Image: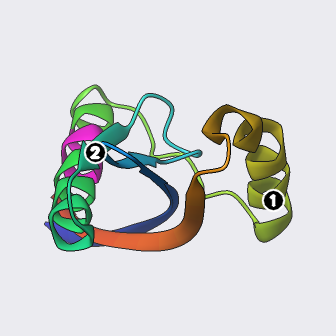
Amino acid sequence: MKRQIKYNCIFVYGEDGISVTFPACRGCVTCGKSDKQTKLMAEDALRIWCSIVLDNGNLLPPDLSLLELNKWVNEHKKFWGKNKWTIKTIRTTVED
């Protein structure tokens, strides 16, 4: 059965492209050159990450609340320097 999922992620705009991190999905990261390409890469990364978690018999983690997400951003934005960043929600479909 297919299931729609969504998670918040952080897009960080650097000189050499856009990096994406999903704070609730440890190790789920990707990057791209344009917003359009990066969004597609983020959808693929999230779908693959979630599929691996489910295939191993584990439950998907809950997304971070806005309070938790703000805390995560405040703890990590020092690594982004002066680069622009934004929070986006990525949706994808996975097989149960």
- Residue located at (67% from left, 32% from top): 79
Residue 20 vs residue 95: left or right?
Answer: right
What is the three-letter code of the residue carrying label 1?
Asn
- Residue located at (37% from left, 69% from top): 90
Q: Quadrant of residue 13?
A: bottom left
Q: Earlier in the sequence, mark 1 or mark 2?
A: 2
Determine if the magenta segment contains residue 48.
Answer: yes
In the rendering, at what x and y percent does residue 50 appear? 30, 45
The residue singled out by tag 1 in the image is: 70
Determine if the magenta segment contains residue 33.
Answer: no
- Residue located at (33% from left, 34% from top): 53
Regarding mark 1 in the picture, which secondary structure is present there? helix
What segment is highlighted magenta in the picture? 46-51
Q: Is residue 57 above or below residue 17?
A: above
Observer-nearest residue: 49 or 61? 49
- Residue located at (20% from left, 54% from top): 33
Residue 68 vs residue 1: left or right?
Answer: right
In the rendering, at what x and y percent does residue 11 appear? 47, 58
Regarding mark 2 in the picture, which secondary structure is present there? strand
State the quadrant of the C terminus: bottom left
Observer-nearest residue: 81 or 48? 81
The residue singled out by tag 2 in the image is: 31
